[in-house]
Image (cartoon, rainbow, N blue to C red):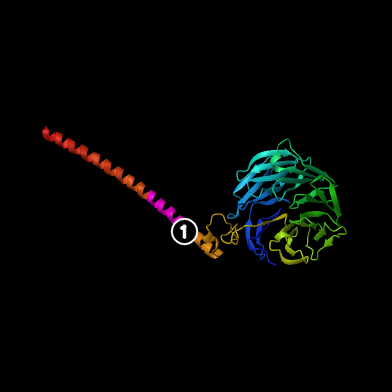
Amino acid sequence: MTPPPSAVILTSSPEGPIIAYDASSGVTVAHFAGSRSPPKGLTVAGQALIAASHISSAAATGSIHLYNWWSSTPIHQLPLPEPVAPITSTSDGLYLFSGGLSGCIYTLSLPSGDIIRTVNAHNKPISCLEISPDGSLLISGCEEGIVIVSPILQLNDNNIILHKFVGHSSSVTAVSCGMMNSTIISSSLDYTCKLWSLLDGTLLSSVTFPCAVLGVAMDPLLGSKFYAGGTDGSVYNFELMNPNGQLVRWNYKHGGAVVAVVVEEEGKMVVTASEDGSVRIWEVERGEVIRSFNQAMISISDLVVAKGVGKGGRCGSGGGCGSSLGFAEKELSMPVKEVMEMEEELSMVVEGRRRAIDTLEAAIEIYETLLGLILKEAKRGSGSKCIDEDKGKA
């Protein structure tokens, strides 16, 4: 089973660039430099932008870096009043939510980066943010162990809270929501994952792990199972609908803590990333690794899967993936090499035009100078002629 070639896996790092991999081959296709991103600090905003929270030890304020698929450096740096870690975006890429150390959630308009809402949601630093599949709910977790669910459209109306789940004894590390918006699951450093009901706000079940859990993802269709990544490097699977369900640990552990878990292909595949820099794609039915790659050799802090990325063009500094932005259908169907050659030819044309304009401007300047000299000589000659005529009359 092979992921679609249009899928791109993005990984962030606290010590290196954002790296884009072709999901079908594992080949590195781009690097996006300039960000030092914390856990849960990477997201894709629509099909146009990549956003990464940036932590700088030299500044007390925070920022979010925006990239497009064509530039390896940030196209925009969005300032925030405090450091932020977790971020998430609406599917249309118009709004970005970020969680601060103070417990505030900031809503930013994209691509301008204007802060349009600030909500005091938690009393402790926000550790994770997630938007429900239908885009109606914002789910946030904090280091105090509390999960809050708020309607996005009413997020700033007296800070309306739909549910406040209190049950974890340590920091919430990740949250995930099923497609039907009836349940959510949260993972924690307290060695548990907890399933919550969005219908009546109750705790449905709690699953205990042999280690802390840093990443969790629910089955996207029925929400009948979930997958979790532990600090022991293992990936776990649990059947929620089975009353006698057992926690299943898959083979082939990562070499470090699993920091991100993403379910893809309608629940048929799971993508995981580890602090040791490795990324793995699993086939759910067999619980086996079908692809593994570790070309970066740097720590990973988060992972997202971007879809809808075009077949042509290039992205970042790698030159291997593209986007439907800026190209017609004809260019999108071309091989990457041909598109890059077109770009080089276009650059040469632009450079030639610039030189032609510079040459023309220089010629105009010389012409103006010569014209001035000619007029000056003409005036001098006219004056001499008048003097000669006056002498003849005399």
Q: Secondary structure at mark 1?
A: helix
Q: Is residue 290 above or below residue 39?
A: below
Q: Determine the residue positioned at 71% across, 36% down.
A: 157
**x and y percentages locating residue 178 in the rendered image:** 75, 52
Of the pair 12 and 203, the residue shown nearer to us: 203
Q: Is residue 22 magenta?
A: no
Residue 91 screen position, x and y as percent: 66, 50
- State the image quarter where residue 292 is shown: bottom right
Most foreground residue, 125 or 244: 244
Q: Residue at x 24, y 41 (%)?
A: 378
User: Which quadrant is the C terminus positioned in?
Assistant: top left
| Magenta segment | 346-361
The quarter of the image holding the N terminus is: bottom right
Q: Farthest residue toward the top? A: 394
| Residue 370 point in image, percent of width and height | 31, 46
Q: Amino acid at mark 1?
A: Met
Q: Mark 1 = which residue?
A: 348
- Residue at (29%, 43%) from the top-left corner? 373
Relative horizontal placement of residue 135, taking residue 191 as reference (left or right): left
Res 36 seen here: no
Total marks shown come to: 1
